[in-house]
Amino acid sequence: MPRHFRQAYSDVTTASPLKRLLSLVYDGMILIALWMVIGMIAVSLNDGEAVQGPLFKSVLLVITYFFLSFFWMRSGQTLGMLAWRLRIQTLAGEPLNPTQTLLRFFTGMLSIACFGLGFIWMFINRDRQAWHDLASGSCVVQLPKQKKD
């Protein structure tokens, strides 16, 4: 049974690459703050010594995935996307499922690892889809402004 967003819009358009980038920067700052809190907790559990190594990095990776996927599945909007009135959805206009969020997350990491080529793809693709959009069968749309009553 398909899930639906709480609020449906009939006049959504494809989001501009600039707004997507600004949303990414906003979410990046939130993630850095979250990583700092996790690092502070890890250091306090390690008797004040610096924490490093594959286990700590894996914890940060998993927390980052759960942070992003929670918002993608719940409302289609991370905090940065909410600020710029963007929403991620399937091509049919539904919220992403766990498989799609996993594909999106790891393909996004691959996009960054390839010197941002996956993101630059938005400027080449006629539908403004990046590699992670194509891999997960999703798109990022611009939501209309709320009308004031």
Image (tube, grey):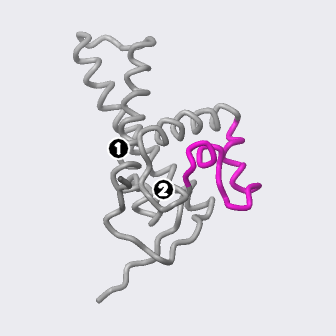
Residue 55 appears at what percent x and percent y?
A: 40, 13
Q: Nearer the viewer, residue 72 or 82?
A: 72
Which residue in the protein does label 2 denote? 88
| For residue 1, side relative to residue 131 (left or right) | left
Task: Check disc 1 and give the amino acid type.
Answer: Phe
Task: Check disc 2 and give the amino acid type.
Answer: Ile
Would you place residue 24 above or below residue 141 in this image?
Answer: above
Q: Callout 2: helix, strand or loop?
A: strand
Which residue in the protein does label 1 denote? 70
Please give the name of the residue rendered at 36% of the width and 36% of the height, measured from the top-left corner.
66
Residue 39 appears at what percent x and percent y?
A: 33, 24
Tell me where residue 115 sits by quadrant.
top right
Query: Is 144 colored magenta in this rendering?
Result: no
Q: Nearer the viewer, residue 64 or 106?
A: 106
Please give the name of the residue rendered at 26% of the width and 13% of the height, measured from the top-left corner.
48
**Residue situated furthest front in the rendering:** 1
Query: Is 131 colored magenta in this rendering?
Result: yes
**Residue situated furthest right in the rendering:** 124
Please give the name of the residue rendered at 43% of the width and 27% of the height, measured from the top-left corner.
61
Q: Nearer the viewer, residue 148 or 105?
A: 105
Residue density around tag 2, few if under 14, some if 14–19, many if 20 or more, within 10 Å:
many
Would you place residue 69 above or below residue 93 in this image?
Answer: above
Please give the name of the residue rendered at 70% of the width and 33% of the height, measured from the top-left corner.
114
| For residue 122, side relative to residue 73 (left or right) | right
| For residue 73, side relative to residue 135 (left or right) | left
Picture disc at residue 132: none
Tell me where the magenta segment starts and ends, as one range.
115-138
Q: Nearer the viewer, residue 80 or 15?
A: 15
Q: Callout 1: helix, strand or loop?
A: helix
Residue 129 appears at what percent x and percent y?
A: 65, 54
Would you place residue 138 above or below residue 41 in this image?
Answer: below
